[in-house]
Image: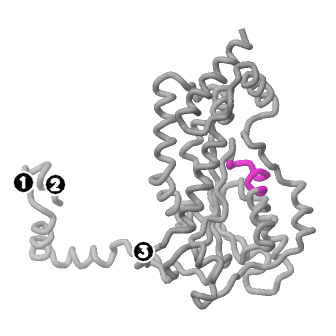
Amino acid sequence: MCQRLQRYHHLHVNRETVSQFLQVLDPQGVEARKHRRFRRRMYFNKGPHYLIHIDGYDKLKPYGFAIHGAIDGFSRRILWLEVGPTNNDPKVVAQYFVDYIQQIKGVPHVIRTDRGTENTLIEDIQIAFRYYHEDERAGFNSFLYGKSTSNQRIERWWGSMRHGSIDFWLMLFKDMRDSGLLDNSSAWQLECMRFSFTGLLRAELHQVGQLWNEHHIRPCRNTVASSGKPDEMYFLPELYDTHDFKHNVPMTDVEAVQGICVRLDRFGCSEDFVEVAEFVMQHKGLVMPHTPQEGVRFYLDIKEGILNLAR
């Protein structure tokens, strides 16, 4: 209404004044709109590993980097945060999940993801390990699908990650593209990007996850979850009158599923490209970068070296 008054009647009226006049002129309409207004759902989670949220983050995909992560719904602790050339390959994201299973020596009570095909192997592994349990969420009930926008724990955290870290990398890579240093429609240049920046991005993401897990979360109106440090809530649930909801699984069975997973190398590049890039490094006396600025210079040197080899 404020916009209508300004655009069509050239009247600049503040929201409070408009609200007061609407209460007088159209009380029934105001009351009807109150009943249809958006109400946030209350989020509830019983304890660590009761429900974990898994998702991929695609903002850096145009520049060769796909992020994948998981968060514990109760403690909001980041369970894994990885970067690679893809987060759509079921075998790759299943490896992240299997690494997590080996770390906690168990599986979560329930997993929540969107309906992407990349989650099919995680679903199979979770259901297989939970198949013979006798609780109400055993077997097929231990895996939930839903809309990506409704996967609220991890979707909310992606926003925090972007503002705290990824915005810098997004702007850096956009500047490289806009200035002509990067043609992100070129497959081999994206390989150069991955060879140059994957290590830096991985270290940054692990640091971001660690800092998040150690910071203090304030109380929230739209959840009945406890406030506190994610690590504390995750590892010491007894302090919050709850317990760990993970289900133990034999490690021999976990090792058996390794054969269907794919572990990426440290660069996330093809073996052939790594061989060529390492030859260029040796020929030019290059060392792996330790800062984003060094990464840009390293990328240009690798790119130039490969172009010289192709001539």
Compared with 140, 70 (above or below) is above
Residue kind at label 3, given as amino acid type: Arg
Could you tell me which secondary element the residue under label 1 belongs to? loop
- State how far apart marks 3 and 1 are (Cα): 34 Å
Quarter of the figure with residue 77: bottom right
**Numbered range of the magenta stretch:** 87-95
Question: Residue 171: image x %, image y %?
Answer: 46, 38
Is 92 in the magenta? yes
Residue ranking furthest to the bottom: 241
Q: How many C-alpha atoms fall within 10 Å of the one at disc 1: few (<14), some, or many (≥20)? A: few
User: Mark 3 = which residue?
Assistant: 40
- Of discs 2 and 1, which sits in the foreground? 1
Taking 31 as reference, is 310 left or right? right
Number of residues whose C-alpha sits closer than 10 Å to that of mark 3, classed few (under 14), some (14–19) or many (20 or more): few
Residue 165 counted in the magenta span: no
Q: Nearer the viewer, mark 3 or mark 1?
A: 3
Is residue 213 shown left or right of residue 41? right
Residue pictured at 59% horizontal, 77% vertical? 232
User: Could you say which disc has been placed on residue 4 in the image?
Assistant: 2
Query: Which residue type carries mark 1?
Result: Leu
* Along the viewing direction, whichever of 153 and 196 lies nearer the viewer: 196
